[in-house]
Image (cartoon, rainbow, N blue to C red):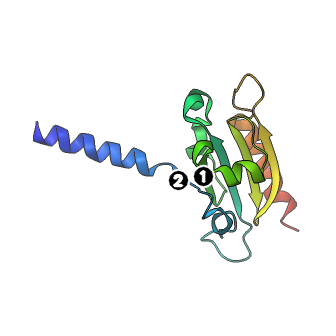
């Protein structure tokens, strides 16, 4: 029983660390994050504005995104400054920052469904990378 409980806590703690969160106080630093590959590498940071009541429609495949610097979630109920700054009305809303500048945004409609799927997001990331190579 002791080992089972230990295993449960280990799995739970890994799941908590799987998603990084961004807040009003640290977003400026985080959207300007650089990749660990070097200074000439472009930085692509994605922020998903999330709401607990609509977790069922959140973007679940974020772990499958490659070629990005970081993927964050922002809890709308705890970050009023970011909500106001980016005029977020519905969750999920997904913003893509390139080198700290807002490049793309996908906003949920009244149906509150995720406004973008994994293939489309991968395509956008690929296009951003290609357009910044020259």
Task: Identify which residue, 32 or 69, lies in the foreground.
Answer: 32
Which residue is most to the left? Answer: 1
Is residue 80 placed above or below 112 in the rendered structure?
Answer: below
CB contact under 8 Å: marks 2 and 1: yes
Residue 56 spot, x, y in % from top left: 57, 27
Residue at position x 75%, y 37% in the image: 89
Residue at position x 76%, y 66% in the image: 99
Label whose residue precedes the other's in the sequence (2 or 1): 2
Residue 9 spot, x, y in % from top left: 26, 44
The 10 Å Cα crowd at callout 1, few under 14, some 14 to 19, many 20 or more, is many
Which residue is most to the bottom? Answer: 39
Secondary structure category for the residue under label 1? strand
Residue at position x 84%, y 66% in the image: 133
Is residue 17 placed above or below 133 in the rendered structure?
Answer: above
Quadrant including the C terminus: bottom right
Residue 36 spot, x, y in % from top left: 59, 71
> What is the C-alpha distance between the residues marked 2 and 1?
5 Å
The 10 Å Cα crowd at callout 2, few under 14, some 14 to 19, many 20 or more, is few
Q: Quadrant of residue 62?
A: top right
Which residue position is annotated with label 1? 72
Which residue position is annotated with label 2? 20
């Amino acid at each position: 029983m002791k080992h089972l409980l230990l295993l449960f806590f280990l799995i739970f703690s890994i799941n908590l660390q799987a998603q990084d969160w961004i807040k009003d106080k640290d977003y400026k630093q985080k959207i300007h994050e650089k990749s660990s590959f070097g200074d000439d590498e472009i930085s692509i940071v994605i922020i998903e504005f999330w709401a607990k009541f609509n977790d069922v429609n959140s973007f679940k495949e974020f772990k499958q995104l490659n070629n990005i610097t970081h993927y964050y979630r922002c809890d709308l109920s705890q970050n009023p400054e970011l909500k106001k700054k980016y005029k977020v009305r519905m969750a999920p809303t997904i913003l893509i920052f390139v080198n700290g500048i807002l490049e793309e945004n996908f906003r949920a409609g009244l149906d509150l469904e995720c406004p973008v799927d994994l293939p489309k997001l991968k395509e956008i990331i690929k296009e951003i990378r290609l357009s910044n190579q020259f």
